[in-house]
Image (cartoon, helix red, strand yellow):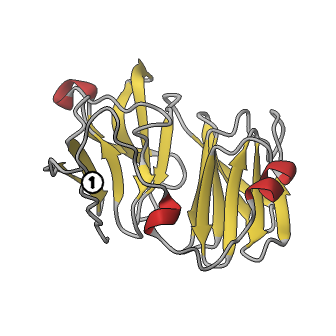
Amino acid sequence: MVTIYVPLQADESTLLPRVSELFQVTNVVLSASSIESLVGTIYEIKYIGDTLFILSDESLLLFKTDGRFITKIDKQGRGHGEYVGLMGFEIDQKNNNILIFDRFGVLRYTMDGKFIDKAPIKGMPLEFALLPSGDYVFYSPMDIDSLKGLWITDSKGNYKRHLLTLEEYDLHIITGSNKLTQINDSVIGFMGPESPDLFYHIKDDMIAEFRKEFDDRI
């Protein structure tokens, strides 16, 4: 991880610099206009190898980095191989699969969009991430099926154990803001209980708490 400090004299008139003022663009994968015309509203993007994975509405689209369209997973419904609502996704690079999360389960697809199987999940969680071990971690703020907080299942959806309960850490993950995020191949990160300088890392199925010190210049 590289940290770049941008010294500012902060006041009401201070304007943050544009990204183009800090970095030189060396390559454009897809232009904004081409993405909007092909995709629509974008909720999440993952960039792995030479492939872009773009979550848009209830579809997941795959593009090569040169802009070539690969495939589209668009299987909303309640039938075999379909998801009720596409809430998130992960890429299982070890098994070369796409994982689709829809609160009721995790569906696996091949990289060309063919359905493999589904792991049913209890508790109706709001957030999902793939752990390095191949297990899944979920978050729910509601006590459904005695599942509340952060818990782990195996890849078949079988409950293993809790990482954190809401009562233990007053945990509060804001969906779409402080969500579970894949930091690298071995670490999942998320923000902590309503404090901008407290965050957590999940690594090797264990959880560690960190406190971030901020530079007054930032």
- Residue at the spot 60% in from the left edge and 67% down from the top edge: 47
Q: Where is residue 89? Give x, y as percent.
A: 61, 51
Quadrant in which residue 66 is drawn: bottom right
- Residue at the spot 65% in from the left edge and 77% down from the top edge: 27
Name the amino acid, label 1: His
Seen in the image, is 200 located left or right of residue 177? Answer: left
Quadrant in which residue 162 is drawn: top left
Depicted 95 relative to depicted 100: above or below: below
Which sits in the foreground, 65 or 159?
Answer: 65
Which sits in the foreground, 81 or 93?
Answer: 93
- Residue at the spot 42% in from the left edge and 59% down from the top edge: 131
Badge 1 density bin: few <14, some 14–19, many ≥20, Cα 10 Å: many
Which sits in the foreground, 19 or 198?
Answer: 19
Q: Where is residue 206? Give x, y as percent.
A: 24, 55
Q: Which residue is mark 1?
A: 201
Depicted 188 relative to depicted 133: above or below: above
Q: Where is residue 82? Give x, y as percent.
A: 79, 42
Q: Where is residue 52? Give x, y as percent.
A: 68, 66
Q: Quadrant of the N terminus?
A: bottom left
